[in-house]
Structure formats: structure tokens, C-alpha cells
Image (cartoon, rainbow, N blue to C red):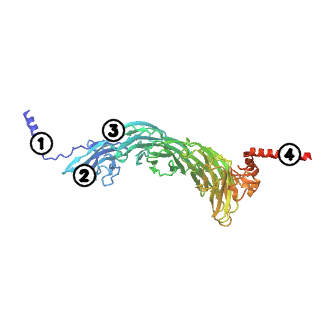
Amino acid sequence: MSYKLNNLFTLSMLLILFLSITPISAEIYSSVVGQVSEGDTSMFLIDITKEDAVTITVSLNNQDLISTTPDDEITLLGIYDPLGKKMTDAGCTGQILQTCKVYNPTPGTWLVEVKGDRIYGDGKVNVQASYLVNNYQIYYNVYDSDDYTAEKYTMNQYSMIFLKKYISTSDRNHFAVTSEWDDYVAKNEITIISPNIKTQTDTSIEDETNTQTYYLTPGSEAEGNWLVLIRALKGSEPITIYTNYGYLDLVPTQQLISDEIKKADEAKEYPILVTDTSTPLVLSLLEKQSGDTVTISKVFNPSGVEVACTDFGAGCAIQDPEEGIWLVDISAQSITGSAPFNFASTHHTYEPKDYTLEQSINANDIIFYESYIKTQDKEHMVTVADWDDSKINIDIAIISANVNTKTAHSSGDEKNVRLYSLSPGNIAEGKWIVQLASLEGEGTINISSNYNLTRIASQELRSIENIAQDENQKFLVNVEVTDIPLVISILERQSGDDIIIASIINPAGKQISCTTFATGCAIQDPKPGIWTVNIKGKSITGTAPYVFASTYSLTDCGNGVCDADIGENCRTCASDCVCNQFEKCGVEDVCVSITKEVKKDTIKDKLKENIFNILIILAVIAGAGYKVYKDKYAF
């Protein structure tokens, strides 16, 4: 017993002596022993706290294996710093054993990823990270990221699901998502999308049955709603999702739409209602048919302005989308027959109802349609024209009730043109106008709109054979019902001519401004009466034929002879049509007969005012006459 105590005392003294000459500057950790399966990957995390050079070593843990067993073939896929940057120095990738040395490392959570290529034993791996202090190795804390919450989702082929998780800037850990399924035929994909639209994606290949992706120190990148997009590229299989941030929430406003593009030059428009601006607007497409390529071609904000959508391979995303109705155009790059596809969005998406009109249109023809829109109609307004003949060139204009305008036209061999105005109810309530013009060619056009269109009954068009250089030609427009804007349009029928609207004069004789658009201009709430529109030949080559069109009917203002047309507007018509000597310009600014309208202080008014005096005078005259009469009679 005393021998054991003496030995214990001796060992204690030796330990005290050793500690007295050994500097203690950090807690010493042992390396972590992890495991990887064949065809699978595993992740290890390192908490690096200092900027001293760090040595990261990844090796096989095969000390217990029988010597005749081949070594496991395991690859070091990469070592990533806290910002997700992959180290490219020697030893940072490749078949293990590998030693990677990093100088001046960024403090934070680092990640080591390994893959089991061929596993003959147990697939165990040693991972360690250390730095030197006074020639002593101090080991960092390395841990296997195995604290995951699992949840199963049923994935049909071509289905897409958006999940989200709020991560604050205080969360310094990485954000990892892994998935597993049973069917070796199924092919799935995971994408992590940060609030500032930085992404990480992993897609299974061949007979893999898992995927995993991660984002390091996400809180330092962006605080907010992080999104996880899961896509079933092939097969229908329940998939189990694991995450180190607990359960993920389904995005409540997400929408999945199945549709198809039937023609190579066709496009689809999808309005998207954004109410939660804290969730990025993420769009994703999946073609259902091999050989088809369908793309998100354009994205427009609620103001109708085309904006950039950050591409991440599986779709595109917009950070902090403004509230309102967005519009997404989907078009085909190359298709075989029709092209079926699924379209997913993080926000509520819906398909506008189409009303279709078939209209024959002549060359240089202009047709006006009207549609009433209320302020509670928050849907966008879209108008699409399609035709078969590539020789036709069509122009479309949308003019709102307060004459905010949008225009678009086809070019080259295009056989359709589309135009839209977003959030129309927020702009103006009332009659909206859609103008369709044939810039060249004629044929049958299909007009589609998500609001019912009706041809304007009062519209009129005139074809003019010629206008000379600097010549002014006048048109008189009779505005009777004023519930639609006054829209004036001009189409030159000859290339090189420039014909303009020189001035517009209202019924009161005052020249007013007119809101211009591609082929003309528009006036909101026009006053009733005769309007004068002066057209000028600004730049003319030889003869210059053109077409003049208006949403209201035209008048010749009595053909220059007002006495034959009582009721014409004498103020507007005064330059070429003056009231004659038997007429005058009355209080309503129209020519009236003198016998039908007499101003105050006329003879009749004076007679009424002096009727008593007149009666006395008449009585006196009558009495004198009687006396004369008596005298005459006496003779």
C-alpha cells in the first residue's frame, strides 16, 4: 500500500513540475472523428477564433482495420471560410490524407466537406485544426454538425416547395439543409437563398439519394427571411429534409402553376401580388418535356418598369420587392410542339382571364376600344394582339382614364405584340382606351385582354391624300359624350414623312396641351363642344398621304356656311364659318336666329318696363281723336 502511495506522490510531483514549465494559453481539444458513407458527403465545423495561421488536417481513422482491408477512398471536397469562400491552396482539396494551411484566417465558423467515394471499412475520418503558441500546438474546437431536425415532404415530379426561416445577425452558425430519399431514380435539388439574394445549390446526379447545401455564418451575410427551394426534377418520392435551424416554415403565399406555351413566339404573363416585402420574390421554372427551354424573360415592378432579376440557375430572385402587383413574362427559347411547364413563386400568383375579339383590320387602320376599370380592380390590364401574316406590323396603346399611356408595337417578322399597365385601379377609375393600329399590312387580328373591350361607337377615321410641306390642315372634332378621353392619332402612309399635331383648341377658343404617345396624343375629360385640331406637314417628300383618327366623331362645321346650319359652334367655327346677318352668336356659343334670341334692353323689354306710361299716352291720344271725330261728325 505504501509503495502505491509513494508512486502516486512521485507522479504528482512530476506533473506539477511539468505544468510549471509548460505555458497554458488555450484549452486543448482532441480531433473529431466523423464518418462518411459511400457516395455521401459529411460536413465538419471549426470555430476559428484567432488570426494566427491555422493548419487543418483531414485523415483516415483506420487504426482498427485489418491490414488486408483496402483503405477507404475519401475525398476532401473543400474547406470554406466564414463567408463561404473555398480555399484553393495546396492540401485544401483532394484525396485524404490532406493538410491545408491557411494564413491570417478570418475568425468565425469554417466548414470542411468530405465525400465517401469507395468505403471498404467504416468510413471514419479524423478532422483537426490547430495553431502554434510558443511552439506548442493548440487545437480549435472541431465538431460534427449532427444536430438536425427532420421533416418529410411528399414531392411529385416537377413539384416545387418554398420553405423559410428567420435568421438574425446574432446567429453565427452555418445554415445547412440536407435531404434524403429512397428511390435511386428520383432526382432532387435544394437551393438556399439568403435575404440579399446570395444562393447555394446542390443537385443530385445519377443514382444519388441525397443532397445537401449550406451557407456559412448566415447572420453576418443578411438578417431576415432565408428561403429554401426544393425541386423534384425527376421521379415522385417522399423526401426528408434535415436542418440545423429547427423546423422550417412553409411560405404561405407561395403558388405553383401548371401551364404550357403552344407557339414558339408566344409568351405568358403572370401577375404576382406582393404583400410581404420582407420575403424575397423568388421565381422558378421546370420544363416538363425533354428538349424544351422555357425562360423567365422579363420582370416588371408595380410601376410597370422592367427590373433585373438575379439569376441563380433554378430561377431568379428579387430582394426586398415593393408592395403591389408585379408582372412576369415567360417565353419559349426553343420548344418541340407545345411546351408544358410548372411555374413557382414565393408570392401569390394568378392567371388573368382573357377576353378575345377577332377584328379584321386594313392597312393604316386605327381602331379604338374602351373598358371601364374601377379603383378596387387591383389586377393589371394586359392587351395582346396575335396574327398569322408576318407582313403585318401592329401598334397597341393603352390610355388610362387620366391619360397615362403605354405603347408597344411589333417589328420585323414578329406576329404578336403585348402591352400592359400595372395596378390600373391605383392610377385612375373610369373609361380606359386601347388603340389598335395597323402600321403596315392588313389581315385578321385576335385581340385579347383581361378586361372586356368594347369598340368605341363615336370614333371616326379619315384618310387624307396629301399635305404639303409646312401646310396646316384643320379637323373639327365634335365632343358630345365626355366619359372617355379625347384621343387623336396620326399614321403616315409614306415612309420618310413627318406629320405632327401642331395645336389643339378647345370649344372656348383656348389652345391646350395634349399628352403625347407614339402615334398621337390624349386629353382627359374633354369639355363638350367643337374642338379644333391643326395638323402640320413638318417634313414631306412629294405627296404625303396620312390617316387621321379620333375617339369622337368629326364635323365639317357647316361646310363654311353657318346660315344653313343653325346650331353650329360659332366661336370655334368663326375662322371659316361666320354667323350671317340674320344670326348671331348666342350665349351657348352657337349661331342662333335673331328672331329666336334677343338680348335684354331690346324694344320689347322697354315696352314692358313703360307699359303704364304707354297706356296713358294711348288714352290721351284716344280722347283727342274722339273730339276730332265729334267735330267732324257735327259738320
Element under label 4?
Answer: helix
Which label number is shown at residue 52? 2
Element under label 1?
Answer: helix
Element under label 2?
Answer: loop
Alpha carbon separation for disc pair 1 and 3: 39 Å
Instruction: Judge depth for marks 3 and 2 and give the one in front.
Output: 2
Asked whether the residues under the numbered discs 1 and 3 touch, taking CB atoms below 8 Å apart as contact, a structural biologist would say no
Which label number is shown at residue 147? 3
Image quadrant holding the N terminus, namely: top left
Residue wearing tag 1: 16
Asked whether the residues under the numbered discs 4 and 2 touch, taking CB atoms below 8 Å apart as contact, a structural biologist would say no
How many numbered badges does the structure rendering display?
4
* In the displayed structure image, the side of residue 347 where residue 505 appears, left or right: right
Residue wearing tag 4: 627
Give coordinates of residue 634: x percent, y percent: 91, 45
Alpha carbon separation for disc pair 2 and 1: 29 Å
Instruction: Judge depth for marks 2 and 1 and give the one in front.
Output: 2
